[in-house]
Image (cartoon, helix red, strand yellow):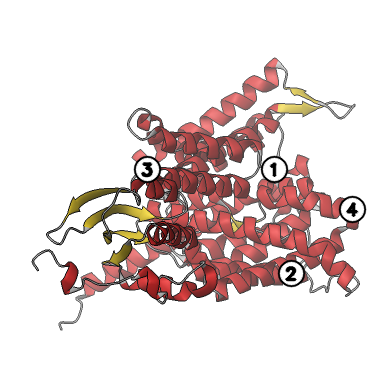
Amino acid sequence: MSAKTPTGARFEVLKDFGRMKTEILSGLTVALALVPEAVAFAFVAGVHPLVGLYAAFIVGIITAIFGGRPGMISGATGALAVVMVALVAQHGVEYLFATVVLMGIIQLIAGAMHWGKFIRMVPHPVMLGFVNGLAIVIFLAQMGQFKTKLPDGTYEWLANGPMLIMVFLVLLTMAIVHFLPKFTRAIPAPLAGIAFVTAIVIFFDFDVSRVGDMASIKGNLPIFHIPMVDLTLDTLWIILPYAVILAAIGLIESLLTLNLVAEMTETHGGASKECMAQGAANVVTGFFGGMGGCAMIGQSIINVKSGGRTRVAGIAASLFLLGFILWASSLIEMIPLAALVGVMFMVVVGTFAWNSLQLIGKIPRSDLFVIVLVTAVTVYQDLAIAVIVGVIVSALVYAWQSSTKIHAATRINRKGSKIYELEGPLFFGSIESFMATFTPKDDPADVIIDFNNSRVVDHSALEAIDKIADKYTKAGKRLHLLHLSADCQHLLEKAGSLVEMSLIEDPHYGVAVDYDSHYHEDD
């Protein structure tokens, strides 16, 4: 193997330097976008802004180092905040910290049990509905920046002048983010857009809302703090329901984000590893005064679009965020919210699955219904509920469609036995069609059910077979089950007393599980 030439070595160094620069600048872009999000979600949950910022830093850096998908960004999210608000309002922030610790423990258990693999059960229409709904949620969340708060606590749209300035700055940011990559990729386009628009606002002294108008982000290092709650069963029963819900929402959003980023970067991620990282991050966050968190699709897309592909970007984003809190709060608070809104609008454009609109009329109506349903539930209810509803509806649709696929071709062999050659799965949804297939009163004395092209799936199928066998027995006829696969035979044997009679052991059923020469066509 030949050694690299000086020119080649220099090229590798420059390439590594370029990659590192891209990762760090991408992390800076993400950190700038994280600040208003973390503050806003802290307000939603009813806690101090630093509680949201600490969560963004701690969850972000732990998952960046140990997570299952390099390039993903995690932090405080709105999906979790809306669940936390009731807990904080009724019991206080200390109970929230204890809940976040328990939430993390539950996620660690999920990772250790490899439950993350079940994310593969989410159908593609559910994924499309999920990303479309999330894009709409992100879009609607930015609408608050186009309103002003009145003395009575209500909100109204900005007046003509301020509205025009706001729209101009948002569109300018979006234009920079869209067109800059066509000329250069030396600096992430979102970062360039934020910097340029901030400079314009400062130079012309535009009277627009800035990050500092939301809240001060200045603070100190997070300090280890054991949640001040009574260690009793009463406390456990208070926090357990919230912890389970938060853990489920966090894992669902994180694993769906993992799949989305994996598709965008054409790479693979470890679902169980991500569960473990999320769990560890939330346990630590709960002990350091954070509100907990999970993967953030919007910020993850910003990172990917800015060129972030490795763990460096996520680590850099978290460290930049901590730097803002400790030393650069006055500078960050000068950034106009319009610039960040423009960046998030571009995230909306990049997140929404526009190709799903082209699927109308080209895919089954049931799949189209699932896409629209998941989108609507995500917008009007909750991400986790939307995904669960989508999976349930998809499963029911599949069960209904499968229930209509079972049928049987019949013929009489040379011995005079009637053979039912089944096609399709036998399960709870298809047993009605299965039962209607047979005519015990009209059939000859010897009947064979051939399962060569069918499968016995569940207990309902066993019950159906038992009922059919009982009908043929009462009619004084013999029934044989042929070509049962090994797993189907095992299911029948394992059923034992779960059915009225064991079809394998009851002699007066005369059941055979493999072809006997007596029933072979050629004999």
What separation in Å lies between label 4 and label 1 (alpha carbons)? 35 Å
How crowded pointer 1 is (Cα within 10 Å; few <14, some 14-19, many 20+) is rated as some
> In the image, is residue 120 above or below residue 201?
below
What separation in Å lies between label 1 and label 3 (alpha carbons)? 63 Å
Query: Can residue 199 be seen in the rendering of this structure?
Result: no
Q: Earlier in the sequence, mark 1 or mark 2?
A: 2
SS label for mark 1: loop
Label number found at residue 334: 1
**Residue type of the residue flagged with mark 3:** Thr
In this image, 4 relative to 135: left or right? left
Residue drawn at the location 42% of the way across and 53% of the way down: 307
- Please name the residue that numbered disc 2 is placed on: 101
Query: Where residue 354 sits: x, y (%)?
Result: 41, 34
How crowded pointer 4 is (Cα within 10 Å; few <14, some 14-19, many 20+) is rated as few
- Please name the residue that numbered disc 4 is placed on: 90
Query: Where residue 291 sits: x, y (%)?
Result: 74, 59
**Residue type of the residue flagged with mark 2:** Val
Q: Earlier in the sequence, mark 4 or mark 1?
A: 4
Q: Earlier in the sequence, mark 2 or mark 3?
A: 2
SS label for mark 3: loop
Query: Where residue 374 sits: x, y (%)?
Result: 54, 40
**Residue type of the residue flagged with mark 1:** Met
Label number found at residue 404: 3
In this image, 178 relative to 266: left or right? right
What separation in Å lies between label 1 and label 2 (alpha carbons)? 34 Å
Quadrant assignment, res 414: bottom left
